Amino acid sequence: MKKLAAVYGGSAPHHRALNEPKYRRWLSGLIYLPDLPGADLDGFDGLLIPERLHRGKLDEAAGSVLAYLDRGGTVLVFSGGEHPPVWLPGLKWEHRPTNFWWWLEPGADLGLVCHNPDHSLFGYIELDDATWHYHGLLHPPEGAETLIALRDEGALLYIDRVSTPGTLLVTTLDPLYHFGSYFMPATERFLDGFLPWVVRELL
């Protein structure tokens, strides 16, 4: 099995989500955020960076993460709730107000679309599994692959294999926070499919 490490920031939602047995089985290691700058990442095929980490501590690890990408590593970044790290290669993010209660409106439609229904990710999740809310839009670099987008606007999840020798997946979704906080059922369905897909297909 390919080896995926996750960064652990010390919060209760991270602790619950990353140690939930059905998710922990897909992780080969947890790296405490303050230890990330000096961590040996070469023993892992991928690195998962959750949303809502201490930004100052994460910025201290920028050099380590970028060097890992330059060596061909795979990095997955959840940025829900705030701007993604500005040092990520090729990143362009646009603020959008988050509508937490869109589903209460008659005929509600969050507006998400799947750009490539035949992609392997959608053998593990459905678009509804990624539909709760989002935190801003992404404008991927030319040549990156958008998988989930807002209709006629920017991306919510893309894979970039052009900006570095490695693979960078960025999304403005926040499933670990919500699953770890015991609310938002779609996030559990998302993680149920996303983590196996990462280990089996992406890495």
Image: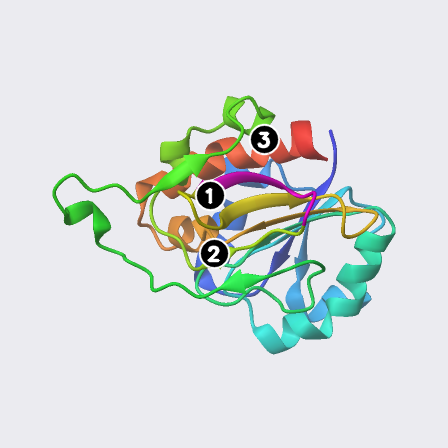
> What kind of residue is marked 3?
Pro
Quadrant the N terminus occupies: top right
* Residue drawn at x 65%, y 66% as measured from the top left: 33
Magenta span dominant secondary structure: strand
Mark 1 residue element: strand
Q: Quadrant of the C terminus?
A: top right
Label 2: which secondary element: strand
Q: How far is the residue under mark 1 from the one under mark 2? A: 8 Å
Rendered position, 118 above or below 68: above
Residue, disc 1: 149
At horizontal 22% and vertical 50% (from top left) the residue drawn is 102
Q: Which residues are magenta?
A: 142-149
Q: Is residue 104 left or right of residue 20?
A: left
Q: Residues within 10 Å of mark 3 (few under 14, many from 20)?
A: some
Residue corresponding to mark 2: 137
Q: Which residue is mark 3?
A: 196
Where is residue 95? Give x, y as percent: 44, 66
